[in-house]
Image (cartoon, rainbow, N blue to C red):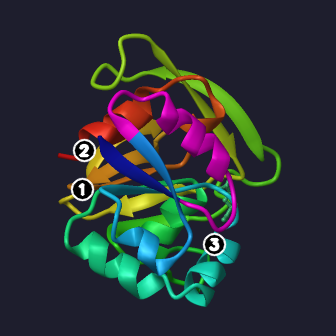
């Protein structure tokens, strides 16, 4: 069994745990404390509020230990606020968190008018059918380093990308019934 953690400080935590519970050969693990980090094979950083998650990461003394595990190539996936937490650069915010992925993101990038929206796409590498995408005050990726693979663009904006063992999505697969991205992430864990 692959033990996949979900960072349980704030945000869509239970939804990710429920999705992982439906993926073959995966044991979902709630991650809150430093000691939890040692026992996981991969980690999801959920959506929520990046400033709150970032502050709690520091309060729970998780920032350093997580950086170490990600540097030693533990697979990690950030959804929405989680993407902001993983980014090395945030175009419209001074704060920095895990600074793991060579991407620059824009917080709340879709503005007030298009606060939240859903759509669906074909992503042949991930699923045979259309994948539903849910965006909630979402960031998108403004630029990536050459070593970052762009998985999906929507209206010219990067909304899913991967850098080796690190995955980031602007949207929330855990708020849909579609397991494609959770299966894909589980596949990144050897
Ligand atoms: N707007 C939030 C932030 O900047 C992210 C929203 C989300 O995760 N759904 O942290």
Q: Is residue 64 visible?
A: yes
> Which badge, 2 or 1, comes first in the chain's sequence?
1
Disc 1 residue crowd, few under 14, some 14–19, many 20+, Cα 10 Å: some
Res 165 label: 1
Res 188 label: 2
Quarter-of-image position of residue 165? bottom left
> Which badge, 1 or 3, comes first in the chain's sequence?
3
Along the line of sight, the residue nearer the viewer: 2 or 183 = 2
Which SS class for mark 3?
helix
Along the line of sight, the residue nearer the viewer: 8 or 120 = 8
Q: How far apart are marks 2 and 1 (CA)?
A: 7 Å
> Magenta residues?
7-26
The quadrant the N terminus occupies is top left
* Residue shown at the point (72%, 35%) measured from the top left: 117
Residue 185 in the image: state x and y as whole percent. Answer: 34, 42
Which SS class for mark 2?
loop
* Residue shown at the point (70%, 75%) measured from the top left: 52
The image shows residue 147, relative to residue 55, as above or below, that is: above
Q: In which quarter of the image is ligand 1?
A: bottom right
The image shows residue 125, relative to residue 141, as above or below, that is: above
Does 7 sit left or right of 115 as displayed? left
* Residue shown at the point (60%, 23%) measured from the top left: 177
Which SS class for mark 1?
loop
Along the line of sight, the residue nearer the viewer: 160 or 3 = 3
Determine if the magenta segment contains residue 17. yes
Q: Name the residue under label 3.
A: 53
Q: Can residue 88 be seen in this view?
A: no
In contact (CB < 8 Å): disc 2 and disc 1:
yes
Residue 51 in the image: state x and y as whole percent. Answer: 67, 76
């Amino acid at each position: 069994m692959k033990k996949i953690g979900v960072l349980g400080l704030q945000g869509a935590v239970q939804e990710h745990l429920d999705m992982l519970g439906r993926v073959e050969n995966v044991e979902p693990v709630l991650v809150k404390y430093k000691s939890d980090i040692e026992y996981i094979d991969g980690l999801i950083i959920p959506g929520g509020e990046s400033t709150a998650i970032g502050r709690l990461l520091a309060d729970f003394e998780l920032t350093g230990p997580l950086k170490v595990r990600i540097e030693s190539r533990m697979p990690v996936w950030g959804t929405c606020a989680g993407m902001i937490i993983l980014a090395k650069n945030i175009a419209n915010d001074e704060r920095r968190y895990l600074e793991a992925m060579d991407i620059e993101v824009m917080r709340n990038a879709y503005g007030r008018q298009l606060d939240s929206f859903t759509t669906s796409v074909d992503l042949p590498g991930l699923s045979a059918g259309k994948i539903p995408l849910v965006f909630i005050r979402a960031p998108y990726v403004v630029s990536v380093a050459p070593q970052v693979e762009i998985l999906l663009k929507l209206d010219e904006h990067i909304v899913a990308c991967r850098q080796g063992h690190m995955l980031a999505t602007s949207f929330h697969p855990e708020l849909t019934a579609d397991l494609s991205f959770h299966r894909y992430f589980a596949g990144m864990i050897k």
